[in-house]
Every structure is written in C-alpha cells, then in structure tokens.
Amino acid sequence: MLDCPNPPPVTVILDPHDDVVHTRAALASHAPHEGRLTVHPTPGVDSAVALAHDILAALNKPVPLNSHRPRDPAPAWSTAAAWILATPITHLTLLRAHLLTPHRFKDLLALRRRTGVRLVLVCHRRTVQAFLERELRQVEHQIAEASALLPEAELAAPRPPPTVRPLANRWLSLPALTTLKTFDETTTPCRCTAPMATDQDFYPPAIPPVTEAEGARRLHRATAHPHQAAKLATAIFTAASTTQLDTAHVRDLGTDGTTITLHDHGLRQGCMTHPVPLWARPLLRAAALLWSIETGTNGSLFSDPLESKEAPSLTAFAESCKLRPPQPPRPKRRRTRSRTPQRSKEPVATVWPVCTAHYRRSWGIPEPDLMQGCPYPPPHTAKTIARKKNGWMPPDYGLRELRHLR
C-alpha cells in the first residue's frame, strides 16, 4: 500500500467575498501537464464519489466509472490517486471547499497521504467550518488570505490558436495491431531476465509522429481505467499478441517505467524487453501504481485490481478509440454517368486478422493465417527490413500459401 510519510502541509485560502478575480486566478493555474490541478466541484452534489469523479474529470478522464459499484467511492479515489502519481500532479487546488462534508474531507486527506500532493482548499467564507478546523488540528496546515495567494492576474496575452489535429475523428490504421489476435493460449509467466528486443533482432512497426501523437491523445482520454489504456498502448509499441500481453506482471515493468518485459516461451521471438515510449509511460505507470495502491502485490499488469465488471474486450476498446489494423482494400469505384462522385463508406465492422508473422517457427502452427484480405504486417527483423528497402521480400516472409509464388 502506497503511503507518503511526510506529505506537504494543507493550505487553506479564505476568500470571504467570493471574489471572481480570485476564482479566475485559481482556474488559470490549472495545468495538468505542469503538475497543477484545479478542481471546481459539481454544484449541488455532496457525495464522496462525485468529488473523486470531479478530480478524474479535471485529469481529462471520462467519468463516471460505470464498471464499478455506483455508490462505492473507493475505486474512484484509488483510480484518481494512480493517475495523480503517474502524471505526476504536485498541486491540487479545490474551489468551494467551504461546502465540504466530513467524509469528503477525510477522503481528500487520504488522497494527500497516498500521493503526497500539495492540497490547497479555497473557502469562500470568513472563518473555517468547525469540523474542518477540528480535522486540520491533526495535520500540518496553514491559513492565508486570498489576496496573498490568489492575486489578480495580469491581462493575459491572447491565447494561441488550438493545435491543429490533422487526424482528428479519423480511423488510425496501425500495422502493429495486425498481430494482436492469436490462436494459442496464454502461457505461464516466468521470471527470466529477458534481453532487449533489438538484441533479439525484433523491430516493431514504426509509427509516424503525427499518428503517434493522435493515438496517444486518444488513449490518454479514452478511459479512466489505466489497465485498459496501458494494455492497448503496449500492443501498439510492441506489436505483441494478446497472449504475450497477458503474461506481463507488475514486476515486468521497469522501476522507472522505461521498459516492459513480455514472455512467450519461445513461440514467437522469445521473452523480450521492449523500450516504452514517452507517451505510453504514464499509462503503464498508472496501471502498476493502481496495483500498489489497492493490494501491494505483484498482479497481472493489464488486469484491474478493483475487479471491474463488464469491461470491453481489447479489440472493442481499440475500436472505440478508432484504432485498428490496416483494413482490406476497398473495391474499385465504378464509373457512372452521374456527375456526383461516389463517396466511399467505412466498413460496417472492423476486420481483425489472425497473423503468425512473428512466430519463430511458423511451421509449428497448424492453423493458417486468417488475414481476411488485410495486408500483411511490415518486416520485423533487420534482414527483412533491409530487403524491403531494396524493393523485394525474402522468401521466408509472408503468407505461407504464397511463398512458392515468390
């Protein structure tokens, strides 16, 4: 169980006149990418789970957590703590703190002990409530005036135009997801010291920077459950199958979150350690931290220690993010006499092929590839990549039923 032995003192800011200048100053300090979070609680709601959802919403996570018991606040608070530690968030400012109830304030103090976040409470009253004053006697705290800590902000410079997202609302075709589905069952995890993927001559498909940025944005905002986002992210940067992903445990994630080890007992390329890109590290850290917060045990990294129910499958979650493997080519358009051009329609359902390209001994897999018209994944070894650049593929790569035609 995670616990911060010496969390920073609680800061109580008194704003008796409820000055809009001070509120704007608090909201202007909201910058999750810089470690500062400002939460404006939902008005008219005093439940603890609602406050936890407000914190998750400030972290750009979708709420509520429908896969847990709706009235149980513990999963929401644990999930919020995991994201705060993984992001990381160092300052948490709560507006309308004079409306806090005793149980909500105790949950905030528990969040402070878990994460070590600097808690700032903005009370729009002249004095602190009696129960709040009583609880604050038990923790280190300080009381200040709003004019001292929330001064009137200077005239802000005009906001820069929003970042252009050329791939917004479009399907992203990721070759790494072509090998996601598999025939074989999950093997028992091992405690080996796996070599790096490059030392095993394995190179996952490269992702263009624009596609990587858009995919990372979708995964960070798609779900509040870190294990779902972390599992799909790992599949994207490792080109691993579901059986390989299910072998990862908390101990397989590097202490600094920069590497992840996957096991397969030699069916594909053997147990390998993959580098974790920058955009995926908070997702994997949050998944591991949630296990440390809830149980403190070394569980399966991509499973939920909170035992959520009715969680979507990995392929369904990928489709909700508009992420999928390259699809079969569309049929050619027919020439018509009509001047209005025919618009191509998206397929009704995403095709998820079963590909054995990354198996070390493809002859040992009795089932054939089920590509269903999808293109084969790109080469994954130094030899095949070099020959691909020269304009041809080696005879030992590709669909087995087509190799005699090469």
Image (cartoon, rainbow, N blue to C red):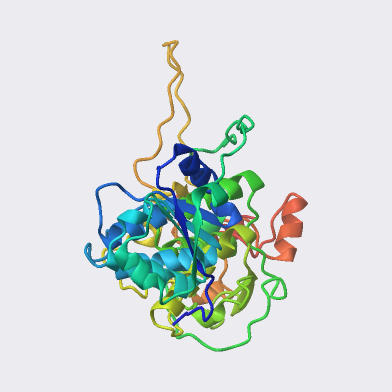
**Residue 208 position in % (x across, y down):** 65, 48
Q: Residue furthest front?
A: 126
Of 260 and 364, nearer the camera is 260
Q: Can residue 85 be seen in this view?
A: yes
Q: Where is residue 281, by image quadrant?
A: bottom right
Residue at x 51%, y 63% (from the top left corner) = 283
Residue 149's place in the image compared with 289, above or below, is above
Q: Which of 44 and 371 is in front in this view?
A: 44
Q: Position of residue 19 (x, y in %)?
A: 44, 40
Residue at 43%, 81% in the rendered image: 299
* Quadrant (top left/top right/bottom left/bottom right) for the C terminus: bottom right
Q: Position of residue 105 (x, y in %)?
A: 34, 66
Q: Nearer the viewer, residue 272 or 339?
A: 272
Residue 180 horizontal side relative to residue 349, left or right = right
Camera-nearest residue between 24 and 279: 24
Q: Quadrant of residue 258?
A: bottom right
Q: Can residue 375 be seen in this view?
A: no
Residue ID at (40%, 59%): 224
Give the image location of residue 301, x and y in percent: 46, 75
Q: In which quarter of the image is the N terminus?
A: bottom left
Across the whole image, how many numbered discs are drawn on residues?
Answer: 0
